[in-house]
Image (cartoon, helix red, strand yellow):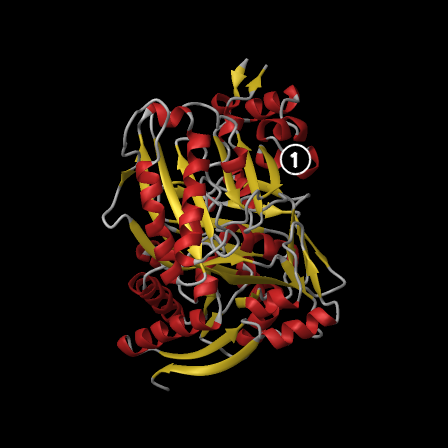
Amino acid sequence: MNEIRYIAASGALGAGVDARALDRALALEPHFIASDAGTTDAGPFSLGGGQPAFPREAVKRDLTRVLLASRKAGVPALIGSAGTAGGDPHVDWVLDVAGEIALEHTLSLRTAVIRSEQSKDYLVGLYREGRIRPLDPAPPLDEAVIERSARIVGMMGVEPLQEALEGGADFVLAGRCSDPALYAALPIARGLPAGLAWHAGKVTECGTMACEGGRGGVITATIREHEAIIAPFGEGVRCTPQSIAAHSLYENGDPYLHKECSGTLDLTGSRYEAIDERSVRITGSDFIPSKDYTVKLEGAERIGFQSIMIGGIRDPYIIGRLEQWLAEVEAHIHGAVERVLGLGRHDWTLTTHVYGRNAVMGDLEPDADAIPREVGIVVAATAATQDLATKAAQLSRQPFLHHGVPEWMGGITSFACLHNPAHIDRGAVYRFNLNHVAVPRTKTEMFRTEFVQLGNAT
Amino acid sequence: MTRLAELSSLIRSKNAGPFVLTFDIMFPDEASYLRVKGSGRLNAGHFAELFRLPVGQVRFFECDNARAFKFSIPRPVTQGDLADGDLHGGQQFIPLMDIDIP
């Protein structure tokens, strides 16, 4: 029977791999073991700053478990969206970790490294040909946005992964990659139905998050002609039709339609049935190929550098007129920064987050008018250099500290600073600046695969 | 009347990428799901009113096979931008808890 079995070792390389469950799951005789390592959920800093969101030690621990299990089973290991954002520095960082593991454990790994960071010249070329299209909603795009980006990656589909596997890779280390593509690549290459392969990938890419019951564990899938079987291994961990159905709509704007490079996964007709107390059968999932091959772009640009100050207010007179008091304080700060540093309102940004009022929900907060007992305030100064941001934060302290209210006569100290010094330098801050797809001229031109040998050659 | 929070097993919000917020409402059994669905109290208009958004921004889905409802909206502030106070979007669902279901 034509079928592909695999183990999803973790939902995020670095967040933990259950070594015992992974070892037990090898009884499935998988065709590959994989783990996603990236997400935009960590925020724009990782992509913009070229840094991973997990410590090296955590990624090394998890990758060691994945690589050792894959060698024990004699099947390929795949890691997608290396180093959180999947840019070139992130791929290099994980490649270095993998090289170290290979030497320490005397592994010999024919490694396919697939890069997905995009050059600005290439993207400007696509833009001029009308080959970059906005998704909904999308920030405005022009050539200047591309030019000022710190880094842009393209999210690969199954095709570069399939080529790497066909090339005989023991280990596929991919840059930014569609999470389910990591799992759908081999089943689709073997002619199994794309709808079931993509759907299984979607369900398993977060590891055992699609399960209920215990913590930890690993999740596995078996893709066949007419069904995909999802089954976890681990203490007390089980899949139910409800848990799998619920996870199918997690973190997606549309619960039924999921856009990938080569088409759309359609879950409208998906059915979920329990096979036993821990396994679920999926049937009826469809994949609709698209006319154009599109690659999702993720970009981040540096907004500036930031310094923050954290403090609180308990005085009911200030809290009772907080809106006006804050506006007055902010006006004082803008004046001081203009006089001392020569920065006008458009040269830097002052942001205040008022905890206890609406810091968490912002404009969506329905109860912003409720009067709290105390408020916490995070004041953020963002400017073109760290030096200016630090100085703007320093200049913010006095206005917050001593701005009065009519009820009190004489000098007051109105703001309870949490720290000394009151400000904290945060370094560079970034924003996501693209929600677009590229329409490349060929399916493979945005991704670059290189085979390298890790560990000692056999 | 029963609060939605008491009928559901999970109400959550989350980023669906950096530009979209999505809200899921799940149920412990078919009866609770069908009671809420039948009440008609969950719809794009009511959501827009609760969160003070134009109704055209709200997408609403009834997912029978997952016993779930889903709302999706454009993120009011892009994830991680200067004014964003919820990087992962996980704490935006609270107004849904108090919806009264007959």
In the image: residue A449, left or right of residue A293: left
In terms of depth relative to the viewer, which is nearer, A382 or A11? A382
The residue furthest left is A420
- Residue A268 on image: x %, y %: 68, 43
In terms of depth relative to the viewer, which is nearer, A89 or B81? B81
Query: Which of the image's four quarters has the C terminus of chain A?
Result: bottom left
Query: Which of the image's four quarters has the N terminus of chain A?
Result: bottom right
Identity of the residue drawn at 31% across and 73% down: A101
Compared to A10, does B3 lie above or below?
Answer: above
Q: Callout 1: residue from which chain?
A: B
- Residue A320 on image: x %, y %: 40, 24
Are there few (<14), some (14-19), or many (20+) residues within 10 Å of tag 1?
A: many
- Residue A355 on image: x %, y %: 39, 35
Can residue B88 be seen here? yes
Compared to A294, does B67 lie above or below?
Answer: above
In terms of depth relative to the viewer, which is nearer, A430 or A179? A430
Compared to B34, does A101 lie above or below?
Answer: below
Compared to A3, does A170 lie above or below?
Answer: below
Amino acid at the residue labelled 1: Phe
User: Is disc 1 placed on a helix, strand or loop?
Assistant: strand
Identity of the residue drawn at 34% across and 59% down: A23
Which of the 4 quarters of the picture holds residue A3? bottom right
Residue at which label 1 appears: B60
Which of the 4 quarters of the picture holds residue A129? bottom right
The residue furthest right is A291
Can residue A36 be seen here? no
- Residue A214 on image: x %, y %: 35, 41
